Image (cartoon, helix red, strand yellow):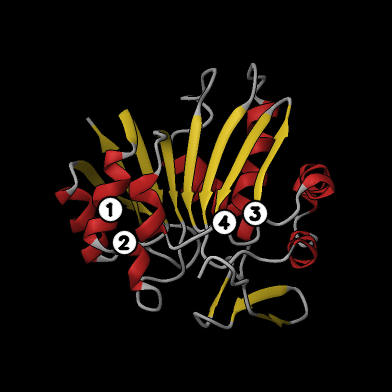
Amino acid sequence: MADQQASLSWRDGSVPVSDQFDDPYFSLQDGLAETEHVFLGGNDLPVRFRPGFHIAELGFGTGLNLMAAWKLWEESGQEGALHFTSFEAFPMAPVDMAKALEAFPAVASWAERFLAKWSGEGSCAFDTLQFQMIRDDARLSLPEWTGQADAWFLDGFSPAKNPELWGEELMAEVARHTAPGGTAATYTAAGFVRRGLEAAGFTVTRIPGYGRKRHMTKAELA
């Protein structure tokens, strides 16, 4: 699996849709606004930022979440580098990332800087960002990861179409790789996802979602 890339189609010429999972990579309403509401707001950022803060993510996709978090890190005046680790089984080719991110001019500066260095796999370092992609099925790679995240972006494709990335065992690994007081956020409020997070030791809250999604999920580890 580690050598496979994303297979995608384009809706209206600008919205990438996964052929593997038949699901768009970001909200058709405003993907950046959804990222800001769900993943940044859901993890109480930038208030919780501190030197060495580490974000981990299930599902790198277009890289939009990374760009939004990096932008917030720099614009909120943090010191040093934001650490960001993403687990992705089917990475998108950099040329497709660039096309997808054109839809979000607010992060254009960050996208251009990142894509100038990004080869499509491995790691990428800047003064204000230390990024690593772990390219494999997270069910296999997360248990072997030695890191701990302060905040998780749970951003796999829809649980109905990609249930493997939302299972109870994987949520237990997310908890095991979360720093004390760490958080997780996701756009879905599916019952089995919430129950999996609760079984893993998170305190789970259902809060208003973005756009047409009535609810989303926010979780905190004591």
The answer to which of marks 4 and 1 sits earlier in the sequence is 4
Q: Nearer the viewer, residue 130 or 37?
A: 130
Residue in view at x 66 percent, y 54 percent: 121
From the image, tell me which residue sits under label 2: 189
Three-letter code for the amino acid on which mark 1 is drawn: Met
Q: Secondary structure at mark 4?
A: loop
> From the viewer's perspective, is 9 left or right of 144?
right
Rendered image: mark on residue 63? 3
CB under 8 Å between discs 4 and 3: yes
Quarter occupied by residue 26 = bottom right
Residue in view at x 67 percent, y 19 percent: 77
Judged by depth in the image, the label closer to the viewer, 2 or 1, is: 1
CB under 8 Å between discs 4 and 1: no
Q: Nearer the viewer, residue 103 or 62?
A: 62
Three-letter code for the amino acid on which mark 2 is drawn: Ala
The answer to which of marks 2 and 1 sits earlier in the sequence is 1
Relative image position of residue 149 (x, y in whole percent): 41, 35
> From the viewer's perspective, is 91 left or right of 74?
left
> From the viewer's perspective, is 63 left or right of 150?
right
Judged by depth in the image, the label closer to the viewer, 2 or 3, is: 3
CB under 8 Å between discs 2 and 4: no
From the image, tell me which residue sits under label 4: 60
